[in-house]
Amino acid sequence: MQVGEIASTSKIITVEDILNFSQIVGDANPVHTDPDFAKSSRFGEQIAQGMLIGSLISGVLGSKLPGPGCIYLEQTLKFIAPVLINDFITAFVEIIELYQKNQNSYVRLRTWCTNQNEQIVVNGEALMMIY
């Protein structure tokens, strides 16, 4: 691992993803689950939960960079733009700092997600402990 290293994963967000996530976390907000209600919202259609999109970052961290054996300690997220059904979302992580403290190794990463238009929809930072 080195500062500047980047990893990513991509996924098309489906209505099934949104509904399944709602069931898993108990989020009954109709802007996510009810197409008729969502039409009357400021977005004009159903949107994905911010944490559904943020969780794509977790997938990159746990499986690619830093990868298996790491422990998620912190995550900040700023939700910048809505994610709609059938948006193609790419979650990115980039190492911005590696350090040792109290005999443990840590990595701080910039985290962000973009849509198919390369617009940033989520932005943040993560801290991981490395084993």
Image (cartoon, helix red, strand yellow):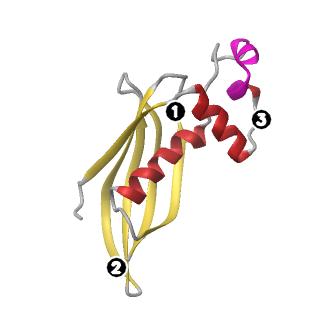
Query: Whole-percent x and y of residue 73?
Result: 51, 66
- Callout 1, which amino acid? Ile
Assign the N terminus to one quadrant of the image. Answer: bottom left
The label nearer to you, 2 versus 3, is 3
Rendered residue at 72%/41% (across/down):
23
Cα distance in 3D space between marks 2 and 3:
42 Å
In terms of secondary structure, where does tag 1 sit? loop
Asked whether, in this view, residue 22 is left or right of residue 128, the answer is right
Asked whether, in this view, residue 115 is left or right of residue 45, the answer is left
Q: Residue at the far bottom: name it.
A: 103
Residue 48 showing in the rendered view: no
**Residue designated by label 2:** 100
Corner quadrant of residue 90: top left
Q: Main secondary structure of the magenta part?
A: helix
Asked whether, in this view, residue 118 is left or right of residue 39, the answer is left
Mark 3 vs 1, N-terminal side: 3
Q: Are marks 3 and 1 in contact (CB under 8 Å)?
A: no
The label nearer to you, 3 versus 1, is 3
**Residue designated by label 3:** 28
Mark 2 vs 1, N-terminal side: 1
Cα distance in 3D space between marks 3 and 1:
22 Å
Query: Whole-percent x and y of residue 100?
Result: 34, 79
Q: Is residue 35 magenta?
A: yes
Query: Whole-percent x and y of residue 8?
Result: 33, 45
Rendered residue at 47%/45% (across/down):
56
Cα distance in 3D space between marks 2 and 1:
32 Å
Corner quadrant of residue 69: bottom left
The range drawn in magenta is 31-40
